[in-house]
Amino acid sequence: MGRRRGTVSGPTERVVIIGAGLGGLSAALRLTGAGRSVRILESGTQPGGLMGRWESGGYRFDTGPTVLTMPGLIDDALACVGETRSDWLDLVELVPSYRAQFADSSVLRSFTDTSQMADEVARVCGASEARNYRRLVGYLTALYGAEFDTFMDRNLDSVTDLIRPEAITLLRLGGLRGLDRMVGRYLSDDRLRRLFTFQSMYAGLAPARARAIYGVIAYLDSVSGVWFPRGGMHQVALALAGAGEKHGTQISYQTRATSVEFTAGRASAVITDAGERIPTDVVIVNSDLQAAYRELLPAGLRPWQARRPRHSPSAFVWHVGSGGELADPAHHSISFGTAWSTTFDEIINQGRLMSDPSLLITSPTVTDPTLAPAGRHTYYVLAPAPNTCIAEIDWPRIGPRYVEEISRVLTERGFDAEGAFSSGVEASRFISPADWQSQGLGAGSPFALAHTLTQTGPLRHPTQHPAVDNLLFCGAGVQPGVGIPTVLLSGRLAALRVTS
Ligand SMILES: Cc1cc2nc3c(=O)[nH]c(=O)nc-3n(C[C@H](O)[C@H](O)[C@H](O)COP(=O)(O)OP(=O)(O)OC[C@H]3O[C@@H](n4cnc5c(N)ncnc54)[C@H](O)[C@@H]3O)c2cc1C
């Protein structure tokens, strides 16, 4: 009997996964649970990849993602090996999910409970905008409903895979129209429009360039909910890796894959930097897509989907541990500047730092004080920044000055009233696009390829190589895309190629 389209032919007993990022861990749990012998090679010393941790002087910082949505996907991965989330993670729902502060100093708290949020919108923007907000929630919920099974949780090997009733629904919902315009049909208050479109930056696009299908990100963090694991985001990676190992996944840390060997047109072994040759039936690549085609795979194998990559913008992240409190503490605060479209233009097209920045300020100690010494706090300030393709910025020189600039802006905007960023700072470190680049990430961007129309859905690199059926991929560079929920899904989709 011939193999089913889109699955791996031949034996699939032994699987080698390159990278213990969330995508790799998700694939590992599913394949371990399905009885495969799984070995993960991880060049670093800990699991989770970008969901990393930095510790200094009793402060514990998450170095990557801070906004956790769709925790059900973590449950789903753990369930593959018969494990339950509550045995591994203590997740807290964040209420409010964000505190948004605008240039006119108005503050709006974002609640996922629609009634509570409608009251908040009415308080800040008026009763008619609260009604508009309720209509927008209906729209975003319909988008999500039409999208999840059709585009997100599905391997798309060709455009014809989209011929489904939900695709018609999506088109009717204006899914391919501009996100800005569609949200603008519902909301008239500029502040609210920003609150429901800024998430397009997570997909690497300005709201004016993103398609309305990316309204689904706003759905996730404004309607569905935002969570935080006690102990920090890195706990998610530890939980997935720990559950896998308990059930037989083998993880080899400080082991870099240096090449994939091919025999008769099939991936047959992975070679490590220690010179080990690991024979295998299936290879799953979780490392950066461009780096994999550059360093691990033969040049001729690069398919069209990986030939002209357009990377997302990058990020400058400043970690601060201090004795000072925020003037109005919140787990996640967004400080919007006055500028908006010009901000995206500066970062994405002009390759300049934001002249009037919009910043994400996360303070995990608001939810879990154990992440800092008693009475102290941790802060994570994320400033979107140009990637290294669009701008050659001398980050080692500019970085310290940019930290001063961010500190000044936060003081001016009233965040530093209690000295969170200025007095009593005991730990401080920044991570710049140059640092992401030195970690091997394409264009110095930790957000992989931008979700432009030509890098979305069936046009984004699939989870299976188009010509080598036992060479699979997962992670932010492939379908469905960047972010915690999506890379967990990509691991699941790659595993389905083996188990279907
Ligand atoms: C600053 C920042 C903020 C973010 N904020 C959010 C957020 O709030 N919410 C959200 O949902 N997402 C967010 N993201 C995105 C999200 O973290 C990523 O999309 C996701 O974690 C990427 O997972 P991945 O599976 O692609 O693997 P990665 O995390 O890229 O891991 C790949 C792994 O492969 C290893 N590796 C690489 N090469 C080799 C090799 N040759 N041999 C062996 N191992 C190798 C690496 O060491 C790494 O561990 C953020 C990311 C960053 C950096």
Image (tube, rainbow, N blue to C red):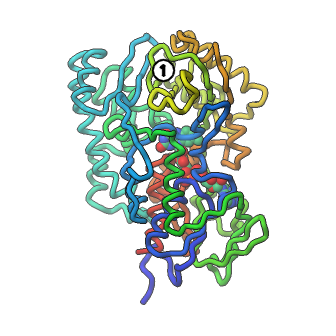
Q: Which residue is found at the position 68% from the left and 37% from the top? A: 433
Residue 365 visible in the picture: yes
Residue 187 pos. (x, y %): 30, 26
Above or below residue 424? Residue 138 is below
Circle count: 1
* Ligand 1 within 8 Å of the CB at mark 1: no
Q: Quadrant of the C terminus?
A: bottom left
Residue 470 pos. (x, y %): 56, 75
Left or right position of 161 against 320: left
Left or right position of 402 against 14: right
Indicate the secondary structure of the residue bearing disc 1.
loop
Q: In which quarter of the image is the N terminus?
A: bottom left
In depth, the one of 336 and 431 nearer the eye is 431
Res 293 → quadrant: bottom right
In depth, the one of 418 and 170 nearer the eye is 418
Q: Which residue is found at the position 24% from the left and 25% from the top? A: 118
Residue 133 pos. (x, y %): 26, 28
Residue sitting farthest toward the bottom: 1
Above or below residue 217? Residue 489 is below
In depth, the one of 165 and 44 nearer the eye is 44
Task: Please give the residue where the numbered disc 1 appears in the rendered image.
Answer: 336
Left or right position of 279 against 168: right
Residue 428 pos. (x, y %): 67, 26
Left or right position of 437 against 185: right
Q: Which residue is found at the position 35% from the left and 38% from the top? A: 225
Residue 290 visible in the picture: no
Residue sitting farthest toward the front: 374
Q: Which residue is found at the position 60% from the left and 50% from the top? A: 49
- Other-residue count near label 1 (Cα within 10 Å), few / some / many at <14 / 14–19 / ≥20: many
Q: What amino acid is found at the position of numbered circle 1 in the picture?
A: Phe
